[in-house]
Amino acid sequence: GASPWPVVLSVCFFVAIVLFLLPPVSGQMIYLPISLILIEKYGYDSAERLTVAILIATVFCTAMKLVASSAQQKLIGAPFAKSVTVKKAFGLHGPTFRIARSILSVRGFSWKKVLVLIGMPDWPISVLCGVLDLAIIPVMIGTSPEMIKILPNCMSMGFLLKSREATDMQNTFNTLYFTAFVVALLIPGSLTLGVAVLVKREIDAHKDVFDDPNSSWFRDPQEAEILLAIEKDEKEAERLQRLTSWNVQPTWVHMVMLAGAVCASLSLYMQGGKPFAPFQFQDKEGLGQLPDGKVVNLIKPAGWAIVGLAGVTTLFLAIFKLWSAVRSKQLETNDASDLTGKPVEREESSLPATARL
């Protein structure tokens, strides 16, 4: 493209870091589009340029990953090291993370430490490193083998771009693209499996401390508070379910829920009518496939209808959530009475007649 390298790299870096800081977004969802942009920017008209482009994308994505992990460790884990809410959200009190604590707390490098750093979910393990107040440089060095997960993603995008060229090697590059993509999926899965085996072995090796409820062996010092908070959340969820179940919902809420279900179903069924214009990454025209050169034109009228139905469904869900919150608040006193087994006295005389009704 015409944009200079500093602009391309800056935009890619900023967008990637923002996405990395969203827990639901996986690394692969970031590596693929970023590597596609960088490889196409550098060029891939020869084997040498393709190789260099893939390496540039791999190094850049690895750097993004390390910066994001550092931010998660030092901006989330360290400041909230004593936050029950944060630890509860990432499950840092469980047996798996007790094993992770024991491995990460050992000085020096080992294959176990590297496996934990790149094989466990990104957010929880980075936050745990912050909670343990580990030095950032050793953690980043131990995380750098993440490159073995990133490289196949970048290779797949390079081969995808080459497969768009009408040459004798087109089918070969197409096969290489699918092979690299499958490898990119298999490596994280294999690492996760490796972590599971490691955790099982470590738990068996320390069976005595795990069987002892009073053992403090790498146990989170706030575990009791975390478990109490989880129990409280479960009770609150049960309470909310009881107060907002279908049987106690008013008619208008029934109508809202049914309308939302209908809208959601229609938005799903309408996808069979080709609501979006075709766009193939393997097409050599690239962005030239965009109708009138605009991304928004990929959405046909039926596509806009799907988007609208999705918005209406979200609105109905928000209405239900709002009603649930209001009803829960109104009946909070009654629910407290049910939990304690003692009636709560109310000074009805001090209430307006409409409130008493």
Image (tube, rainbow, N blue to C red):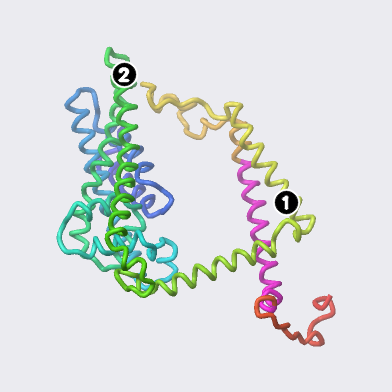
In the image, what residue type sits under mark 2? Glu
Residue 266, placed above or below residue 163? below
Residue at image location 32% in from the left, 73% down from the top:
216
Residue at image location 30% in from the left, 45% down from the top:
191
Q: In which quadrant is the N terminus drawn?
A: top left
Quick one: SS at disc 1? Answer: helix
Foreground pick, 296 / 71:
71
Place residue 101 in its image quadrant: bottom left
Residue 165, placed above or below residue 123? above
Foreground pick, 18 / 247:
247
Residue 50: give x, y in percent of width and height: 22, 28
Q: Which residue is mark 1?
A: 256
Main secondary structure found in the magenta portion: helix
Residue 270: give x, y in percent of width and height: 63, 32
Left or right of residue 46, residue 26 in this image: right
Place residue 165 in its image quadrant: top left
Contact between marks 1 and 2 (CB within 8 A): the answer is: no
In the image, what residue type sits under mark 1? Val
